[in-house]
Amino acid sequence: EIDKMEAMEDIVRYANGFVNYDLVKLWADESGDMIDWLSEIIARNGEFAMRFEGSVGTEGQGARDKAWATGHSPEKLTDDKDVTFGTALRDYAEELGAEFRYDTMLVKCEQDASGRVTGVVCRDGNDRHYLRVNASKGVILATGGYAANTEMVEARQAWNNRLKINVPVGGSCTGDGIKAALWCGAAIDPIGAAVTFNRACCKPDEVAGSDLVGKWFWFGEQPFLKVNLNGKRFCNESGPYDYMLHSAFMQPYHTYVDIWDSDYVEQVRQINEVGCCRLYPFDNGAPSNMPITKMASDFEALIEAGYIQQADTMEELAEKLNLPVDATVETWERYNGFAEAGKDDDYNKEPYRLTQLTHPPYYGVRTGAWFLATIDGVLIDTDMHAVDEAGKAIDGLYMVGNDSGGFFSVSYPNLFTGLAAGRTMTFGRRAGMLAATGQA
């Protein structure tokens, strides 16, 4: 059990912007029931078990931010490659009579004379014919935001297009649900926001930007030494994912460089990250999202592709990364001095995350932002109805997931592990129950 009131205050504080406190409270009140419900579904055939991510990071060592132990992850217990978390949920829905249509694009919602949403018009992606779906109990829009719509990102949050590096695992959400709701008269969050991770990299002669295609770099969230393209350190590398990216936006070409050494396996253990960037099992035995053992093969592939650079000296590494050699070496030496003294005189990084980089070979890569999702959307009430500028609910129209707004602002407070997916599933379940029963 967590202190719900303290946790809610932290969500609002980290968001630091336009947030509907009632929605945050709703998540705190109903997310536990959602996890219990979801756990029963995925464990019913013995294919999965729900694991609680119990670690809250390193306590008692001056951590800058408190990490709340809110995360839960399904652990697969079968070797069947065709079984996934998604298929487990799909199969359960189909057992209850649900019908799935793939390659079907939302075109618009339909409304009656009173303004009630009565269904949707879609287009089949295969033969491109149109179809109408009538929905007497309501329409729930959950099309996933607009991360893949570069034009819409430019209009809503242009700064993130400057930081963005496209990677093959990027999202395919183009804002269809949000636009459909706006055409029905709904209001939208006042500013754009996104879940961005420093998990994308580019080559030594490239810089970040929405036109660039790079590679996935999962290791980027580990708080090792990070310097700008002038070879200068520019912030405390430790903290929530996108804090680094907010700082990077103020640096030349919105791009920076990660630097680490061959001792990273033990240093990562000492750093003791939380959430999905954690590379070791959690303190209670729950598996991490990615294992530390996978990093070596990731590095090898990125080195071969010309992204990560490797060198026996810092001078050589700086040259390979097209960084000013003298400035980079000076920064590296100063950082190692802080690590040896256990005190960061520049940015007050926690001592246990100040690790000396003195074990060659040294590694470095240019880094930018990977978009997981946009997280601004249509304004909703606590019954998940889209609302207009006056706060009046649009009858028959529910918004959940990244189509809905009011919950995040500017930042994604990743110190609440699982919050984005947890908010989505909690509110999705609520919308389904309300629509199915006609309660709201």
Image: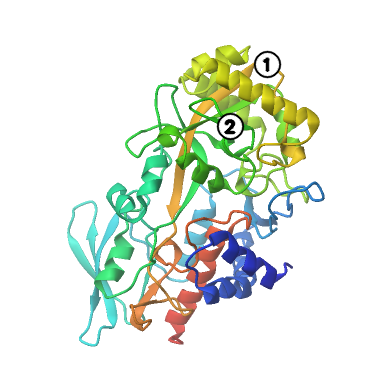
Residue at the limit of the structure toward the right, as seen here: 60
Residue 272 circle label: none
Give the crowd class for mark 1: few <14, some 14-19, many >=20 residues within 10 Å: some
Which one is in front, 193 or 291? Answer: 193
Label 1 is placed on what type of residue? Pro
Tell me the element at label 2. loop
Residue 360 circle label: 1
Which one is in front, 319 or 72? Answer: 319
Q: Which image quarter is the C terminus in?
A: bottom left
Point 50% across, 15% down: residue: 320
Label 2 is placed on what type of residue? Arg
- Determine whether 359 is above or below 151 in the image: above
In percent of width and height, residue 296 lies at 62, 25
Alpha-carbon span between mark 2 and mark 1: 20 Å
Q: Quadrant of residue 426?
A: bottom right
Q: Which residue is mark 2?
A: 233
Answer with left or right where residue 136 lies relative to residue 361. left
- Determine whether 334 is above or below 311 in the image: below
Point 36% across, 44% down: residue: 161
- Determine whether 310 is above or below 157 in the image: above
Give the crowd class for mark 2: few <14, some 14-19, many >=20 residues within 10 Å: many
In percent of width and height, residue 205 lies at 40, 22
- The answer to whether residue 341 shows anywhere in this view is yes
Which one is in front, 203 or 353? Answer: 353
Q: Quadrant of residue 269?
A: top right
Chain-order first, disc 2 or disc 1: 2
Point 19% across, 53% down: residue: 127
